[in-house]
Image (tube, rainbow, N blue to C red):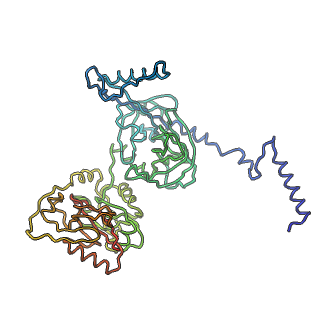
Amino acid sequence: MISMPLLRAMRKASLAATTALMIGATVVPSFVTPAMAKGPESVADLAEGLLGAVVNISTSQTVKGSGGSEGGEDENAVPMPQLPEGSPFQDFFDEFFKNREGQNNGGSQKVQSLGSGFVIDAEKGIVVTNNHVIADADEIEVNFSDGSKLKAELVGTDTKTDIAVLKIDPKAKKLTAVKFGDSDKMRIGDWVMAIGNPFGLGGTVTVGIISARNRDINSGPYDDFIQTDAAINRGNSGGPLFNMDGEVIGINTAIISPSGGSIGIGFSIPAEIAVGVVNQLAEFGETRRGWLGVRIQPVTDDIAESLGMATAKGALIAGIIKGGPVDKGQILPGDVVIKFDGRDVVEMRDLPRVVAESPVGKAVDVVIVRKGVEQTVKVTLGRLEDGEKLAEGEAAKPEEGADKGAEVATASVLGMTIGELDSDARAKFGIAAEVSGAVVTAVAKDSAAAERGIVAGEVITEIAQESVSTPKEVTDRIAALKEQGRKNALLMLASKTGELRFVTIRMD
């Protein structure tokens, strides 16, 4: 219970505080300090020192006119709409379709695009931008904040990370360069500054914070973006994202925006990934990434349970590339990679990135889980670019095997009809001679197998990491798993060309 004297004192204090906070009829909240009233600290000095290193990238591309039909008209062109007499849009459509007819008359036209970039080496004239900014360009021009322009030469590109390196003449102009910082030290909530060329307006500075880390937006195999709310719009692509020390900790690359304008969700390639790519492009004109020579898939909870793993983590090896670094049995299908060269592999997407960042020819330790047992194997990495060519030529040619002349046995299990993989089955489904196992000849609708996307023509090669080759072996293996109290069966399936994948099927 509050006493009357205390209540009167509280009212008096409240009235005095209210009177003191009334300034010219503007009420200032009592929690606002003098420093806060001035607003956030200015970034003018920081921006002034960086603007000279950030450039606008303009490109031009010659697109040939379609021409085609007699009289130079394009048969696929949209006809000019019939407008009412006196329509206010008449002049607009007249001008548009007149220009289009001139462009389509068997000639060509220049298509221009704008983006951003930044100088990282003033002595050599090296400029970094996005690959999509300069893709298919016939001419590339670098425009500086002081209005000067220089022609640029394309040194190299990397489509996987969307990075391109350009070269300009360092003797033609005194250049200002910026350096990469350590993006790993950046935390969610840290202040960042973006400088770029939004909508072709020229050098524009925006400030925000890091909203998230390690974003995967499905744009490439090495997605690990920094997400920021610093305004990034069309034309900012290829521009730098700075920390408050003026170091580049990201390359602005993508936005999420229904309208094309900033809604506070922008993505930047972290410097951790960009530095290695930029250095390789500048030195070799191409990337030289490490390569393990495997096909992988995620480790789901069901797969982890089937493999006897306590938690779902790592990358499941679904196949081995013939002629690759681990083709001699160091790593096998069904293994789960949980650590690579001392770095944890928590999710499937972690493995391609850490392998690609490793030097070609390096011998590394790979920690795997094989049949529930953790072990370490030594692997010497190949080169990804060579491996991609090898993988493209790996497609097997189906060959007809020898006819066993025996009656084909079948079995029904888990919603599948299983048959022997003889010459007739190979011919019917186009299965390569090197694929072995028991073939799925039919899948019942709404069955557990159908839910997992299993289709007729796939071949069961292993169940719970034990090889099977006949329908009887399939049913025996499933029965054994049920006796062990297993809820799911882990199947390794081969496509008709031999590509492997793992699926788990409920057995209840």
Of residues 116 and 408, the one nearer the viewer is 408
Q: Quadrant of residue 73?
A: top left
Of residues 477 and 299, the one nearer the viewer is 477
User: Is residue 477 left or right of 167 when viewed as pictured?
Assistant: left
Q: Quadrant of residue 47?
A: top right
Of residues 140 and 256, the one nearer the viewer is 256
What residue do we see at 29% from left, 50% from top? 385
Residue that protrudes farthest toward the front in the picture: 84
User: Is residue 422 left or right of 492 when viewed as pictured?
Assistant: left
Q: Is residue 361 above or below residue 70?
A: below
What residue do we see at 31% from left, 68% from top? 335
Q: Position of residue 50 (x, y in %)?
A: 54, 39
Q: Position of residue 478 (x, y in %)?
A: 28, 75
Number of numbered discs visible in the structure rendering: 0
Q: Position of residue 379 (x, y in %)?
A: 30, 63
- Quarter containing the N terminus: bottom right
Residue that protrudes farthest toward the top in the picture: 86
> From where the camera sits, is residue 340 visible?
no
Residue that protrudes farthest toward the right in the picture: 5
- Quarter containing the C terminus: bottom left
What residue do we see at 32% from left, 72% from top? 489
> From where the camera sits, is residue 93 visible?
yes
Q: Position of residue 480 (x, y in %)?
A: 28, 79
Of residues 92 and 102, the one nearer the viewer is 92
Q: Is residue 402 above or below residue 137?
A: below
Q: Quadrant of residue 357?
A: bottom left
